[in-house]
Image (spheres, rainbow, N blue to C red):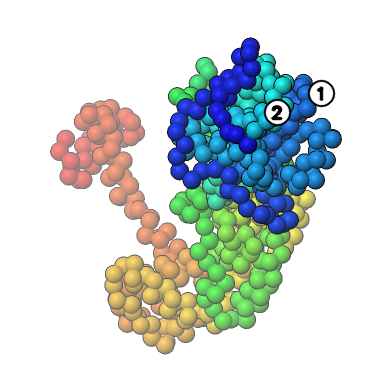
Amino acid sequence: MDKKNTSKPDEGGVKAPTHKHETEGNSGVKRKILTANEIKKRLKAKSWLIDCSAPYINKMFNLLDNQNIILFLTDTEGCILHIVSSEAVSEVLTGKYIIPGSYPPQSTILYSSIEEALKTLNEATSEGSDSLLDDKQGQWISWTSLLLVTSSHAVGTLTLYLPKGVATKTLYAVYSQTVNCIKQEVSFYEEKQQAIKLKEQQLNLFNRYAQADLVIDRSGHINLASDVACSLLGIDKNDIERKSIEKFIPSWESITYLDGKWVEVENREVFLTNVENSGFYLLNSKAIMRTQSKFDEQIYTLRSMKQVLNEANKYIGNTAYVHFDDIIGASVPLKRMLKEAKTIAKADLPVMLLGEKHTGRETLAQAIHSHSQRSLFGFVRVDVGALSGEGVEEALWGYNENHKPHLKRLPKPGAFEFANGGTLYINEIGLLPKLVQDKIFDVMQTQKVKRLGSDRHTTIDVRIICSSSFDLSHKIEANEFRIDLFYTLSTASLRVPPLRERRADIAMLMSHYMGIKSRELGMKPVDIPKKISLILKRYEWPENFKEMIELTERIIRDKGKMFKSFKNERDFKKRNLYLEQLKEVESIVSVEEHERELIIRAYHAFNGSISKASRALGISRNTLYLKLKKYGVDA
C-alpha cells in the first residue's frame, strides 16, 4: 500500500491534514500478542475511555448510516478498544481477528495511520495531529486523530476507515466534531476523577480525627462528610449530596455566610437539631478555594460539648483522683463497705451515700466513679450547702445570655453538661429546694437538660451520686423532700462509717496524715507515743476526718510538746481535743473588750464629738470622757 499525507478535503476530493510537527522518538503502535486474561484486564482498565467515547462514536455512525464506514477506538499503544461497523463488516473483521483487545495487522493502512498519529505524540499540541492514508488502489482511506486532552496528554486515537468515494468535507467535519466531543468528555471525566480523588484524600484526612468534619457549599449543601459526621447526623455517606446543613443547624447562614461572603468562626457554640444526640456543639469553620480566586466551600468542624467539656474537666478540677486502693484502713466496717461499693460501682446506678459530716463521702464517691465504666469522663461536684436556691439551679443547669440579660453574661454550661458521660456528685442533697428537686427528677426521667434562659434541650448521660449527712426520712414526712426522687436516687445506697466505728484504722490514718501535713508545712513529722495512740483510738472523733487533720497539723506545729504537758487521758482530751469547742471558747470576747471597741468606734464615727457619741451610746458626756481616757484615747 502507498502511504501519503494530504490536507483537509475540498470540493474536488479528499486530502489528509498536514502534520504540524516532525515525527520523533519511538512512539507508535506497540504491537504485541495479548492473552485472554490480558485482553480482559486491558478492556476493563480502559472501560472509562470506552464509556466516554462510545455515545459519540455510535451517534456518528448512525448519522452516516449506509456509508459503509468503520470506526476504531484505540489506546495510546494502538490496542483496539472499541469497533463500530455494520454487521456484515463486523463479521469480516472478526474473521481476520480484528477485534477489541487486538492490534491492527501491520500490512494494513489502519495500522499505518494509527502508528503515524501516535508517532507525533511526543510533540503534539492541544490542536492534535491527524494521519490520513489510503491503500495502493486508492479505494480506502484510514483517517486517525489523537485524542489529546492537553498539549502533552493523549488518551488514545479515533480512526475513521471508509471508502474513498464517500469521503467529503461534510463527513470530515462530522468526524472532527466527534473527536472534539470525545476529547471534551474525557476532559470532564478526568476533572471529575481528580475531584473525586481530592475528596477521597480530604475524607481520609478527616477520618484521622475523632471529630465531625463537613464540607458545605454556598447553598448549604453537604458535599463531603467524615465518618464521624455521618454517624452524628444520621446520614448515609453515599447519600450526602441530597442533604442540607440547614436541617441540622438552622442558623448556619447567619453564622458563617453573611452578605454573600464566608465568615470564618472559631469555637462558636451552635445547637444541633434533628439528630439523636441533639444539643450544643462547638463549631469551627474555614473557607476553602476550589476555583481560582474564589472561596466556594467551607469546612465545618463540629465537636460535641460533651467532648469539649470532658477535656475542660481535666483543667478545672472536675476529675476523680481517688481509687479504692487509695482508701486507707483495714477495719471490718470499712472492708464491708468497700466490698459493697465495688459491686455498686460496676452497676451504673444512682447511688445515695449516707453518713456523718467529714466521714469521707466524697472520697468514696470518687472511688466509685474511678472503678466504673464512666472513669474516662468527668467527676463533677456540686455542694448544695454552699449555694443559694437560684445558685444551685445555675450551678446544675447553667444558663445562656437570655438569663438575667442585664448582667451581660456569656453562656455557661451547667454541672449536668460538664458531667455528661461521667458522674455528678451532689453533696447534701437534702438541702435542695423543692423546685430544684422537681427539675432533677425530670432530668432523671428524660435524660435531657435545658439551660436557664434557653428553650433547647440537650441530651445527656449522667450518673448521679448524692450524699446526705442527716436522715432524709424526716424531710419526707414533712413533705420537704420528694419521696419518688429519694427512691430514684437511692437505687443503690451505702452508709459511710464514722471514725468511732473504725478504731482499728486510727493509728494508720494518723500516720498517713502526719506524712501529708509535714510535707505541706515543710516540717519534720512527729512520732506519736503509744500512750497517746491508745487515747486517740478510744476517742469519739465527733468531727471525724476534719478533726483528725486539724489535730495532726497542731501536733506538727507544736513539735509534740502537747504529749508531755498533761496529767491523764481526761486532761489530754480537755487540752487538745474537742477542737470545735476550743475554737468557740477562744472566740469569746470579754465585756470590757467589747465596750472598748464600741466606744472608740462611736467616737471616731462622729468625728470626735463627745455630745453626739454619748447620745448614740446612751451614756452621759462625762462617762464617755472618762471611758475614752481609760482606753487611752485623747479627747
- Nearer the viewer's eye, disc 2 or disc 1? 2
Is any part of residue 549 visible from this angle? yes
Place of residue 263 in the rendered image (x, y in percent of width and height, measured from the top left): 49, 26
Kind of residue at disc 1: Asn
Depth order, front residue of 456/134 = 134
The crowd level at tag 2 (other Cα within 10 Å; few <14, some 14-19, many 20+) is few
User: Dot 1, how many residues are within 10 Å of its Cα: few (below 14), some (14-19), or many (20+)?
Assistant: few
- Residue 221 left/right relative to 618: right
Q: Earlier in the sequence, mark 2 or mark 1?
A: 1
Q: Nearer the viewer, residue 330 or 106?
A: 106
Residue under label 1, please give it: 66
- Amino acid bearing label 2: Gln
Q: Position of residue 343 (x, y in %)?
A: 69, 71
View extreme (left): residue: 634
Q: Is residue 407 visible?
A: no
Residue with the mark numbered 2: 139
Q: Residue furthest bottom?
A: 530
| Direction front: furthest residue | 137
Q: Residue at x 67, y 17 (%)?
A: 168
Mark number displayed over residue 484? none
Q: Quadrant of the C terminus?
A: top left
Which image quadrant for residue 517?
bottom left
Between 629 and 370, the one nearer to me in the picture? 370
Label 2, label 1: how far apart the Cα atoms are: 17 Å
- Where residue 282 appears, as percent x and y from the top left, is 55, 39
Number of disc labels:
2
Of the 4 image quadrants, the one containing the N terminus is top right
Proximity of marks 2 and 1: CB atoms separated by less than 8 Å: no
At 42% across and 73% down in the image, what residue appears? 513
